[in-house]
Amino acid sequence: MDQADSLRQLAASGRLGRPPLQVLAVTSGKGGVGKTNVSANLAVMAAKAGKRVLVIDADLGLANVEVLLGIKPRHHLGDLLDGSVPLNDVLAEGPFGIRLLPAGSGLPSLTHLTDTQKMQLISSLDAIEERFDVVLIDTGAGIGENVLFFVSAAQEAILVVNPEPTSLVDAYAAVKVFSQDGHVQKFGVIVNPVVDELSARDIFPKLTTVTNRFLKANIRLLGYVPRDENVHKAVMAQRTVVDIFPKSPASRAFSDISDRLFSMAAPEPSLESGLKFMWNRLLRESSAAAG
Ligand SMILES: Nc1ncnc2c1ncn2[C@@H]1O[C@H](COP(=O)(O)OP(=O)(O)OP(=O)(O)O)[C@@H](O)[C@H]1O
Ligand SMILES: [Mg+2]
């Protein structure tokens, strides 16, 4: 399909005049490195920049984003998947007009989505894709099946990497697994939380030296977020640091990263910009593998 066809398709989908949908999955090799904070803060920055933002809490059963955004959802993904609540009512309203698809807490049934549940989720999200400019997916830790599913929907995986040398191995493993079988080719690295910027600056070149040699992945550096006590204070207040301490060191870093992601070089219009396209491709692949 050529560019003209793609544009026609976009026009037909009601997206003409607005930039193509940007789908970003926030991931990491190891847990507790700041993914949820990155997701919540980037969501607020994108919303402040005028984007219509949907956050998907994909840490199923261990919902966290709602806490950081100060949202008390009435429903969650489980209610959507068991058919008891329509998507519109499941989407919770957050600060700055952000919408959240809540993951629900303590729900073991969601820790492994079945193929039917994945299909249900895809078709529900397809129907609302036009209402958003940016979809930010906060994934759970690790490289499990649910995480792979959500990462496959993204144009770019935002890989949060801890600046300790041991985390390089985890980051490499994550790029390897996520780039395999075409799940995602594009990665943006955020190093967090940084105490010593000089040594943190080694991390990215070290990672790309190995990934460039062994993997086919396109990796860019999005930025370094300093360790900042204000992040903790913001979490305690159930607000984002960019919201309540916009001049703090971490907020400045999030602001630079957000410029890099949301205002510079908007993605080219392409069919690859839709959730529909990517998830349909994924489903085709998984049914081909099963058959
Ligand atoms: N830049 C920072 N400065 C100070 N504290 C931070 C920073 N980034 C994250 N933290 C703290 O680190 C902890 C983990 O953050 P967060 O919950 O965002 O990680 P996560 O990767 O989503 O964890 P999980 O893998 O469990 O989902 C939190 O207590 C958070 O406040
Ligand atoms: Mg988290």
Image (cartoon, rainbow, N blue to C red):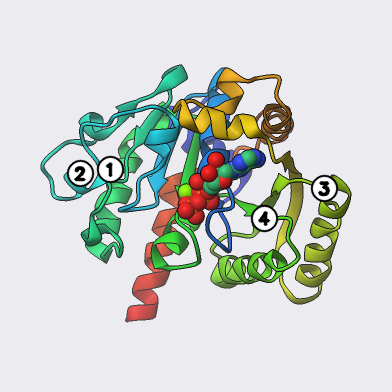
Q: Are marks 1 and 2 in contact (CB under 8 Å)?
A: yes
Q: Quadrant of the C terminus?
A: bottom left
**Contact between labelled residues 1 and 3, with CB atoms less than 8 Å apart:** no
Q: Of marks 2 and 3, which one's residue comes earlier in the chain?
A: 2
Q: Is residue 177 above or below residue 193?
A: below
Q: Looking at the image, is mark 1 or mark 2 nearer the viewer?
A: 2
- Choose the circle earlier in sequence order: 4 or 2: 2
Please name the residue that numbered disc 3 is placed on.
196
**Residue at left offset 68%, top offset 64%:** 167
One can see residue 273 in this view = no
Which amino acid, by three-letter code, is at mark 1?
Ser
Locate residue 240 relative to residue 221 in the image: left or right.
Answer: left
Residue at image location 63% in from the left, 71% down from the top: 173
The residue positioned farthest toward the bottom in the image shown: 291
Marks 4 and 1: CB-CB under 8 Å? Answer: no
Respond yes or no on whether mark 1 lies under 8 Å from ligand 2: no
Residues at marks 4 and 3, CA–CA distance in whole angstroms: 14 Å
Q: Residue at x 66, y 64 (%)?
A: 171
- Numbered disc in front, either 4 or 3: 3
Element under disc 4: strand
Nearest-to-viewer mark from 3 and 1? 3
**Disc number placed over residue 80 in the picture, else none:** 2
Where residue 225 sits, quadrant-wise, is: top right
Query: Mark 4 is on which residue type?
Result: Val
**Is ligand 1 closer than 8 angstroms to the Cβ of mark 3?**
no
Mark on residue 161?
Answer: 4
Can residue 36 be spotted in the picture?
yes
- Earlier in the chain: of badge 4 and badge 3, it is 4
